Amino acid sequence: MSEQAVPGPGPESRPGEEAQAERSPWDDPRLPWEGKPERADILCWAGIVLSGFFYLALIPFRVDLVSHHPVLGSFLNGGTESIVTAAAYARIGRGSLAVLIPVAVAGLMKFDILYWWAGRRWGERVVLLLFPRRKAGARYLDRVHRWGWKFSWPAMVLAPFLPFPSTIIYVITGTAGMPVTAFLLLDLVGELLWAGTLAGLGYAIGRPVVHVVQAISHYGLWITIALVVIVVATQARSVRMHR
């Protein structure tokens, strides 16, 4: 009796190639969603990315905004220096706190809802994606799981005063399921307290702040160049570390 050959596994039966064939092109760990994104996923992610480019594009104009248009700067970049300077100008009669405070609050809040939305849609995955090197994200997630609203609600009000990006708190509150109305209300309270604190500081100091800003404006070009160099160097270092 002749020995019958047993057919070996063909190319189509290799498990590695089958897994690769079944793998979706959207299964990328650098993306916050799993599988093919929905329209809302693309809109939310595009909003976050564009907000980052928005602030980068403002860097060359930041010194000029602080020196000559601090109220506009308070809305565009929500910067501490713009709010303090605008309040100092109000102290010497070149502006009004009644205008500055709502403009500053609107500037501080304008992109916050995007991060709440990201946390609401993608959960803990986006926390680790946006803040991979910050232990605060995982730590605060754990506290939200243990304490619920008793942690997340006060954290929202205090977020502008904390020594790390407020966006961590915004993403986590979305992940925890905070209603959008509660998020917007608490965000409004927190940013109002922060803007009021900065404006009060600038108004109390007054003219000395104006003198400092005017002195800085003489070196605005060099300060702008230095800011651009720092940002480019920071981004290049971040890219190298993630390779």
Image: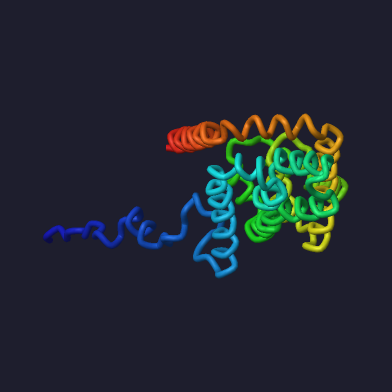
Judge from the rendering whether residue 82 lies leftward or rightward of residue 99; answer left or right.
left
Which is nearer the eye, 164 or 179?
Answer: 164
Q: Farthest bottom residue? A: 39
Answer whether residue 159 is visible to the viewer in this image: no
Q: What residue sits 70% from the left and 58% below the top?
A: 113
Looking at the picture, does residue 132 appear above or below residue 123?
Answer: above
Name the colouring of the figure: rainbow
Q: Farthest front residue? A: 93
Q: Position of residue 117 (x, y in %)?
A: 68, 59
Which is nearer the eye, 64 or 179?
Answer: 64
Answer whether residue 82 is visible to the viewer in this image: yes
Which is nearer the eye, 128 or 211?
Answer: 211
Q: What residue sits 17% from the left and 60% below the top?
A: 4
Q: Position of residue 40 (x, y in %)?
A: 59, 67
* Quarter residue 163 falls in: top right
* Quarter residue 218 falls in: top right
Specify the quadrant that holds the N terminus: bottom left
Q: Position of residue 137 (x, y in %)?
A: 68, 41
Q: Position of residue 7 (x, y in %)?
A: 21, 60
